Image: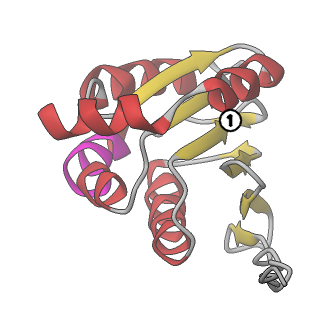
Amino acid sequence: MATRIIRPEMTPSPPIELRHMMGELYVTIQRKEDYIEAKWQGHITADNVVCAAKAYLELLRKDPCPKLLNDKSEVTGDWQEANDWLQFEWLPQALGAGLRYMAHVYSFSMFSRLAVRELEERITPQLSMKNFYERRLAEEWLLEQDDTTAGRRAATA
Protein backbone atom coordinates (compact mmCIF):
# COMPACT_ATOMS: atom_id res chain seq x y z
CA MET A 1 0.00 0.00 0.00
CA ALA A 2 1.46 3.35 -1.08
CA THR A 3 1.90 6.12 1.42
CA ARG A 4 -0.33 9.08 0.75
CA ILE A 5 0.80 12.51 1.84
CA ILE A 6 -2.01 14.88 2.67
CA ARG A 7 -1.02 18.52 2.65
CA PRO A 8 -3.23 21.08 4.30
CA GLU A 9 -4.51 23.63 1.86
CA MET A 10 -2.39 26.74 2.04
CA THR A 11 -4.51 29.72 2.92
CA PRO A 12 -2.99 32.90 1.58
CA SER A 13 -2.18 35.64 4.02
CA PRO A 14 -4.55 38.57 3.87
CA PRO A 15 -3.16 41.46 1.84
CA ILE A 16 -1.26 44.18 3.66
CA GLU A 17 -2.85 47.56 2.97
CA LEU A 18 -0.96 50.74 3.81
CA ARG A 19 -2.78 54.04 3.95
CA HIS A 20 -1.99 57.73 4.23
CA MET A 21 -3.01 59.49 7.45
CA MET A 22 -6.33 60.54 5.90
CA GLY A 23 -7.14 56.92 5.05
CA GLU A 24 -6.27 56.88 1.35
CA LEU A 25 -4.78 53.55 0.26
CA TYR A 26 -1.34 53.82 -1.35
CA VAL A 27 -0.13 50.21 -1.57
CA THR A 28 -1.44 46.68 -1.26
CA ILE A 29 1.14 43.93 -0.74
CA GLN A 30 0.06 40.34 -1.14
CA ARG A 31 1.39 36.88 -1.82
CA LYS A 32 0.30 35.48 -5.15
CA GLU A 33 0.91 31.90 -6.24
CA ASP A 34 4.33 32.56 -7.85
CA TYR A 35 5.39 35.96 -6.53
CA ILE A 36 4.68 38.75 -4.08
CA GLU A 37 2.88 41.73 -5.56
CA ALA A 38 3.11 45.33 -4.42
CA LYS A 39 0.34 47.29 -6.17
CA TRP A 40 0.71 51.04 -5.67
CA GLN A 41 -1.76 53.87 -6.28
CA GLY A 42 -2.13 57.59 -5.79
CA HIS A 43 0.52 60.07 -4.73
CA ILE A 44 3.48 58.53 -2.89
CA THR A 45 6.51 59.85 -1.05
CA ALA A 46 9.88 58.46 0.00
CA ASP A 47 8.44 57.78 3.47
CA ASN A 48 5.63 55.71 1.89
CA VAL A 49 8.19 53.66 -0.05
CA VAL A 50 10.27 52.97 3.07
CA CYS A 51 7.18 51.99 5.07
CA ALA A 52 6.01 49.63 2.30
CA ALA A 53 9.49 48.13 1.91
CA LYS A 54 9.52 47.30 5.63
CA ALA A 55 6.08 45.68 5.37
CA TYR A 56 7.27 43.71 2.34
CA LEU A 57 10.29 42.44 4.31
CA GLU A 58 7.99 41.25 7.07
CA LEU A 59 5.91 39.29 4.58
CA LEU A 60 9.01 37.93 2.82
CA ARG A 61 10.42 36.63 6.10
CA LYS A 62 7.14 34.86 6.95
CA ASP A 63 6.59 33.47 3.46
CA PRO A 64 9.85 33.42 1.43
CA CYS A 65 9.48 34.09 -2.27
CA PRO A 66 12.26 34.99 -4.74
CA LYS A 67 10.05 37.17 -6.97
CA LEU A 68 8.49 40.63 -6.53
CA LEU A 69 6.10 42.35 -8.93
CA ASN A 70 6.31 46.04 -8.04
CA ASP A 71 3.49 47.74 -9.93
CA LYS A 72 3.71 51.54 -9.69
CA SER A 73 1.74 52.16 -12.87
CA GLU A 74 -0.91 54.17 -11.00
CA VAL A 75 1.26 56.50 -8.90
CA THR A 76 2.54 60.03 -8.94
CA GLY A 77 5.19 61.55 -6.77
CA ASP A 78 8.94 61.70 -6.33
CA TRP A 79 10.24 59.03 -3.97
CA GLN A 80 13.90 59.19 -5.01
CA GLU A 81 15.01 60.15 -1.47
CA ALA A 82 14.23 56.55 -0.43
CA ASN A 83 16.88 55.11 -2.75
CA ASP A 84 19.76 55.38 -0.25
CA TRP A 85 17.75 53.46 2.34
CA LEU A 86 16.59 50.91 -0.26
CA GLN A 87 20.15 50.30 -1.42
CA PHE A 88 21.93 50.11 1.92
CA GLU A 89 19.24 48.87 4.33
CA TRP A 90 16.46 47.13 2.40
CA LEU A 91 18.43 45.34 -0.33
CA PRO A 92 20.74 43.31 1.97
CA GLN A 93 17.76 42.27 4.10
CA ALA A 94 15.61 41.38 1.08
CA LEU A 95 18.41 39.33 -0.48
CA GLY A 96 18.99 37.62 2.86
CA ALA A 97 15.31 36.73 3.04
CA GLY A 98 15.37 35.22 -0.46
CA LEU A 99 14.43 37.94 -2.97
CA ARG A 100 16.18 37.40 -6.31
CA TYR A 101 14.00 39.05 -9.00
CA MET A 102 12.02 42.26 -9.22
CA ALA A 103 9.82 43.26 -12.13
CA HIS A 104 8.87 46.92 -11.90
CA VAL A 105 5.98 48.48 -13.82
CA TYR A 106 6.64 52.14 -14.62
CA SER A 107 4.40 54.99 -13.61
CA PHE A 108 3.41 57.61 -16.16
CA SER A 109 4.95 60.13 -13.73
CA MET A 110 8.41 61.21 -14.93
CA PHE A 111 9.58 61.73 -11.32
CA SER A 112 8.69 58.17 -10.40
CA ARG A 113 10.39 56.82 -13.53
CA LEU A 114 13.58 58.72 -12.74
CA ALA A 115 13.56 57.39 -9.17
CA VAL A 116 13.22 53.76 -10.28
CA ARG A 117 15.88 54.09 -12.96
CA GLU A 118 18.31 55.38 -10.36
CA LEU A 119 17.32 52.56 -8.00
CA GLU A 120 17.94 49.98 -10.72
CA GLU A 121 21.48 51.32 -11.24
CA ARG A 122 22.13 51.03 -7.52
CA ILE A 123 20.81 47.52 -6.84
CA THR A 124 21.80 45.53 -9.91
CA PRO A 125 23.57 43.15 -10.35
CA GLN A 126 22.92 42.01 -6.76
CA LEU A 127 19.22 41.78 -7.60
CA SER A 128 17.93 40.90 -11.04
CA MET A 129 15.61 43.82 -11.81
CA LYS A 130 13.84 44.81 -14.99
CA ASN A 131 11.49 47.72 -15.73
CA PHE A 132 8.38 47.51 -17.91
CA TYR A 133 5.75 49.81 -19.36
CA GLU A 134 3.12 47.04 -19.29
CA ARG A 135 2.14 44.91 -16.31
CA ARG A 136 1.47 41.87 -18.48
CA LEU A 137 5.06 41.90 -19.78
CA ALA A 138 6.45 42.38 -16.28
CA GLU A 139 4.50 39.41 -15.00
CA GLU A 140 5.55 37.22 -17.95
CA TRP A 141 9.23 38.07 -17.40
CA LEU A 142 8.97 37.41 -13.68
CA LEU A 143 7.35 34.02 -14.17
CA GLU A 144 10.10 33.01 -16.64
CA GLN A 145 12.90 33.60 -14.14
CA ASP A 146 14.78 30.65 -12.67
CA ASP A 147 15.93 31.02 -9.06
CA THR A 148 19.15 29.00 -9.52
CA THR A 149 20.77 31.60 -11.79
CA ALA A 150 19.96 34.48 -9.45
CA GLY A 151 21.25 32.54 -6.46
CA ARG A 152 24.63 32.13 -8.12
CA ARG A 153 24.69 35.81 -9.13
CA ALA A 154 23.82 37.01 -5.61
CA ALA A 155 26.50 34.77 -4.09
CA THR A 156 29.21 36.26 -6.31
CA ALA A 157 28.10 39.91 -6.15
Res 48 visible = yes
Tell me the residue that label 1 is attached to. 72
Quadrant occupied by the C terminus? top left
> 45 above or below 5?
above
Could you say which is closer to the camera, residue 143 or residue 89? 143
As drawn, is 48 to the left or to the right of 129? right
As drawn, is 118 to the left or to the right of 133? left
Q: Which secondary structure, mark 1?
A: loop
Amino acid type of the residue tagged 1 in the rendering:
Lys
Question: Picture coordinates of residue 87 (x, y %)?
Answer: 25, 43
Determine the image quadrant of residue 52: bottom right
Q: Is residue 130 magenta?
A: no
Determine the image quadrant of residue 104: top right
Question: Picture coordinates of residue 114 (x, y %)?
Answer: 46, 18
Name the residue: 72% across, 46% down: 40
All told, the count of numbered labels is 1
Determine the image quadrant of residue 10: bottom right
Quadrant occupied by the N terminus? bottom right
Could you say which is closer to the camera, residue 6 or residue 63? 6
> 40 above or below 147?
below
Could you say which is closer to the camera, residue 110 or residue 83? 83
Name the residue: 74% across, 23% down: 140
Q: Which residues are magenta?
A: 82-90
Name the residue: 32% across, 55% down: 90
Question: Picture coordinates of residue 99 (x, y %)?
Answer: 43, 49
Label 1 crowding class (10 Å Cα cut-off): few <14, some 14-19, many 20+? many
| Main secondary-structure element of the magenta-colored stretch | helix
